[in-house]
Image (cartoon, coloured by chain):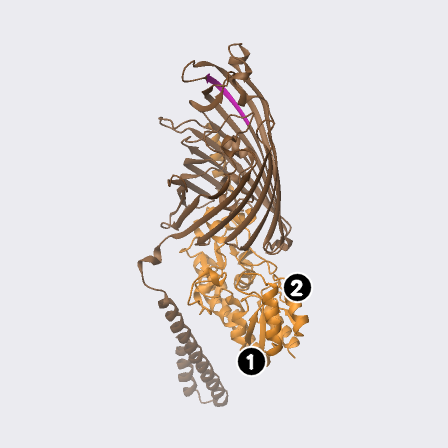
Chain colours: A orange, B brown
Amino acid sequence: MKTLLKLLLASAAAVLAWPAGAALNVFACEPEWGALAQELGGDKVSVFSATTALQDPHRVEARPSLIARIRNADLLICSGSELEVGWLPLLLTQSGNDRIQPGSPGYLEASQYVVRLEIPKVIDRALGDIHPSGNPHIHLDPRNIAKVAQVLTGRLVELDHANAELYKTRADSFAKRWQSAIELWATRAAALKGVPVVVYHKDMSYFINWSGMREAGALEPKPGIPPTPSHLAELVERMQRNPAKAIVYSPYNNAKAAQFLSERAKIPDVMLPYTVGGTEKAKDLFGLFDDTIDRLRTSVK
Amino acid sequence: MHRNMLCAVALAMATTSAQAQDSVREEIKELQQRLQELEKRLEQTESTATQAAVQAWSRPQTESALNPGVSVILNGVYGNFSRDPSTYRLNGFVPTMGDVAAGRRGLSLGESELAFMSNIDPMFRGTLVASISPDNSSIDVEEGYIQTIGLSNGFTIKAGRFFSAVGYQNQVHAHAWDFADTPLAMKVFLGNQLNEDGIQFKWVAPTDLYFDIGVELGRGRQFPSGVDRNKNGFGSTNLFTHLGGDLGQSIAWQTGLSHLWTSPRDRAYADLDSTGKGVVNSFTGKSRLWVLDAVLKWAPNGNPTYNNFKLQGEYFRRTENGDLTFDTASRALTDGLTSRQSGWYLQGVYQFLPQWRVGYRYDRLDSGTTHIGLVDSGALSAADFPILGGYNPKRNTLMVDWNPSEFSRIRLQFARDYSRLNQPDNQILLQYIVSLGAHGAHRF
């Protein structure tokens, strides 16, 4: 018992001795939210992104390194709508951190603040891995980024009052730059209006909706179920009758299925960055949309 | 709002100033434009707000909105054993007061699991996992605990019945195991899987490298403790620590060390004496178990969807010393007993296609040294304690499973098991495991 007490005391001492970091620790489930927090917080935040563009945010291991990071987080920002349901709840219960539990100001589910698409009328797993609260990949509509930026600014101000003015200034600057970027993107994306595309997973829906493109099919037979030969054959046939202009997929998808369909149906396949870091040009949120639109314009010419 | 006011002030100022009329006109024009822009933005916000309100209302307003998450695990097995599973034992090791055989012959329903979990309030989260046994229709509480979510600085307290943090696999629910049954070392040292009634304190260090340390104080309701003790205080203590992190993008690892100490009282087991007559012996003393565990997971760029590999191993070491009573029912001879035993396993599971995995496991136990006072003094012979005779069980296991989705798994497993002295057992298991309802999050 004595050694135990000593251990506990030693650990408590270690906690108190730990240097209080100047920056606000932000734990972002996905790179897009990490990039947004960086835009708004500048050097007043220290951002950690739990996933990269090469990782499927549905399927992430609740790794020890993630528990270590979430334990120190002051603010957590995730897409929500059950996207992280396979790993985030475990991180939260293991974190020993009350600042980022649901309901506290340090917990931000981005999808709660935007209008979600594809809310299923029927909720049944026979339909695949569906999201009862709607499609969670909300960041690919640039207007949603603007909305989440407002909410995130509010949280930064609330949690780090000392730097409130700085956050507000940065948010204003970001909002202006973003607004003019949206206008530019809208002009550039006008060429995409009505263009039919085949997607891999339903993770492009918000972009398709914003740009006015049309989804002509999905490589996954059902959400979350990997492409099957029979489904691909059916798609090839459908494409012969009603060809799409491009097959789009994300860096974390298996390119082979897209290439297979591309060869058979003679339709170009194009990898879109999907999130920040997905391609070389998608270095930040601006680059993400620049490159997405560029790649689409080039391939559907 | 303040922009509108600014606008009004600017307008007022503009009318009084007669000198710079041209520039003022321009300013007014600009302000009007800004006003229009603002109005447009307001309109947009309003329309989204209405849409959002519509979405919020589309959720049915019922009491069930606050129901806990419910999930059900169903599993069924076909077993083919070359030796009768009801005679299963691990020679060289004291039996663990319960059935640890890998399964039954023929078709059978496995244990069905019913789990409820939810946050209780800002302070606590609650979990109940009940297992329904198919034969005597009894419902067992496998886990039923509350844990804190409202503490800070990395502290978590858990109370109730839970799988003890001794070793790695002991904390993993059966439906998430990579093989159909437990490693031999868990069978002999933890009686398959140890769930204690108790309280757990855990602290996670504020470092980027994962480090935790914790202690569990338990009732001592199961092997390696004895029968339920009618005693105040606590009957088992487990001290544990873990270290973990990432190696680049593709590899994640975790190691752990735990030390479980208990004081068994009248821990009974059945054996045959030298004449072949069934006797019940019992042990009272101290039992100390050390477990060293390590897990390494690889996935290209940290994306396990297509290919991934998991390597897992644990080393167990136990010392027991105390008194052994022979034939408690009639002769009741008592003398000292000391033993020092160990065991380990290593297993690898590789996902070679999105829905397919193969795995191999090697088990090895070392019955080590056992000194039986009654034998050393000449009162009885080693033949009176056949199960404690020196023997090193081992086993090779192969499995392949198909996972149509995250929620279902069909597994074929083959094992050649040398648990019984000189009696290899070929075991074939074909199993389905599915989960319904709330999406459970799996431990690392």
Which residue is painted at 48% across and 51% down in the image? Answer: B434
Residue occupied by mark 1: A194
User: Is residue A183 one of those drawn in magenta?
Assistant: no
Task: Pick the residue in front: B202 or B237.
Answer: B237
Callout 2 environment at 10 Å: few (<14), some (14 to 19), or many (20+)? few
Q: Is residue B312 above or below residue B61?
A: above
Q: Is residue B121 above or below residue B381?
A: below
Task: Pick the residue in front: B43 or B282.
Answer: B282
| Visible residue check, residue A141 | no
User: Is residue B321 one of those drawn in magenta?
Assistant: yes
| Visible residue check, residue B253 | yes
Q: Are marks 2 and 1 in contact (CB under 8 Å)?
A: no
Query: Which chain is home to disc 1?
Result: A
The x and y percentages for residue B158 are: 42, 41
Q: Amino acid at mark 1?
A: Gly
Labels 2 and 1 share a subunit? yes
> What secondary structure is the magenta-colored segment mainly?
strand
Query: For the magenta stretch, what is the residue range?
Result: B318-325
Query: Which chain is home to disc 2?
Result: A
Q: Identify the image quadrant of residue A204.
A: bottom right
Q: Earlier in the sequence, mark 2 or mark 1?
A: 1
The x and y percentages for residue B54 are: 37, 71
Q: Is residue B224 left or right of residue B50?
A: right
Q: Which mark is residue B24?
A: none
The x and y percentages for residue A81 are: 46, 61
Q: Identify the image quadrant of residue A233.
A: bottom right
Secondary structure under the numbered disc 2 in the rendered image: helix
Q: Is residue B176 above or below residue B52?
A: above
Viewer-nearest of discs 2 and 1: 2
Task: Pick the residue in front: A103 or A219.
Answer: A219
Q: Amino acid at mark 2?
A: Lys
Residue occupied by mark 2: A256
